[in-house]
Image (cartoon, rainbow, N blue to C red):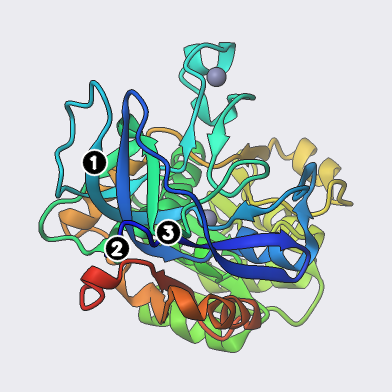
Amino acid sequence: MSTQDNTSVVLHKIKDIRLEPKPIRKPTKGQVQIAVHSVGICGSDVHYWVNGGIGDFIVKSPMILGHETSGTVVELGEGVTNLKIGDRVAVEPGVPCYKCDQCMDGRYNLCPDVFFCATPPDDGTLTRLYCHDANFCFKLPDNMTYEEGALLEPLSVGVHACRRAEVTGGDTILICGAGPIGLVTLLTARAFGATNIAITDINAKRLEFAKTLGVNHTILVDGDPQSTAKRAIELLGKMPDKSIDCVAFPPTISTAIYATKSGGTVLLVGLGPPTSEIPIVNASVREVDIKGVFRYKGCYQKAMDMIARGLINVKPLVTHRYAMEQALEAFEMTKSGEGIKVMIKCDPTRAQLQ
Ligand SMILES: [Zn+2]
Ligand SMILES: [Zn+2]
């Protein structure tokens, strides 16, 4: 690769993605420079592209997209000892401040001063050469592909959700939504020992896909939340111990609350409308705990170990691959919902590798 080439996928404003060269940054102290290999497109990338923002995060100046990343270390900054040139790594996109209350409490995903790839104003990883804190780069074992490395990002969301929900051996689980996050949550819940899992969606094709990943029951949503909850309970044979909502839409949150057993837990993954009408009294009088989930902390290594040990197989999730030059097509495909995970390949020198 020419060192001059730092083509990047840049969002200028709503519906305006451009491929353009960006200056090459050198790794600062504690950073490594990475030749980016595979970047998965996330719903949030598409959201920024289509809507120009998510909640309070508004794209005000051009921003490089992408945060589900793997690549090869090509240069070490001063003081880096945990990695060497040539290492294949997965990049955890959030680098916290290490100083605030949340960081000191070990909840660095809640750090107000976190740098997070492709969350305005922070640039993402859809570029050829990218610099990142070496402590948040995880060396991939030889038996893992670059794409599996990039998938550690969404998988970490599933791992954090299942940890917050305290999913454990023999659990009965309801998952609302069979998109990429619902599917990684399914894979994680199984790896954590859940034995009876139902998943809902409005898209029959996604439910068929979930069946190939080994879900026990699928529910095509075509009614109100109470009837969907009733069907889930019938199929599972009991009320789920935990329900994990991966849609963040009032009707699916309501389904999760109605279905969950008294004393159980409802987990809210993802960001929907800022206010929602949900049956809060139903949850309250049955002591159903409702918990939020924001990104993840300390999950990359665990997610990686589960893949490397064969407990989780994320490979089938990749349904489409595009070269960086076809980024717009890749974004259109993600938006269409036709595929599950769309990968953009950024490293022409290792193009034959997955
Ligand atoms: Zn993501
Ligand atoms: Zn902090």
- Marking on residue 6: 3
Answer with left or right where residue 125 lies relative to residue 43. left
Residue ranking furthest to the front: 4
**Circle 1: element type:** strand
Residue 214 appears anywhere in the view: no
Give the residue type that dot 2 points to.
Ser
Tell whether circle 3 marks a residue whose Cβ is less than 8 angstroms from ligand 1.
no
Instruction: Place residue 202 in its image quadrant.
Output: bottom right
Rendered location of residue 345, percent (x, y): 37, 71
Q: Residue at x 48, y 11 (%)?
A: 104
Q: Residue at x 66, y 69 (%)?
A: 17
Q: Residue at x 47, y 78 (%)?
A: 325
- Marking on residue 123: none
The answer to whether 256 is drawn above or below residue 339 in the figure is: above
Rendered location of residue 122, percent (x, y): 60, 41
Gap between marks 3 and 2 measured at Cα: 9 Å
Which residue is at the front of the view, 339 or 263? Answer: 339
Gap between marks 1 and 2 measured at Cα: 15 Å
- Contact between marks 3 and 2 (CB within 8 A): the answer is no
Answer with left or right where residue 96 lies relative to residue 278. left
Mark 1 or mark 3, which has the lower sequence index?
3
Q: Quadrant of the N terminus?
A: bottom left
- Marking on residue 2: 2
Give the residue type that dot 1 points to.
Glu
| Disc 1: which residue | 75
Q: Residue at x 19, y 50 (%)?
A: 140
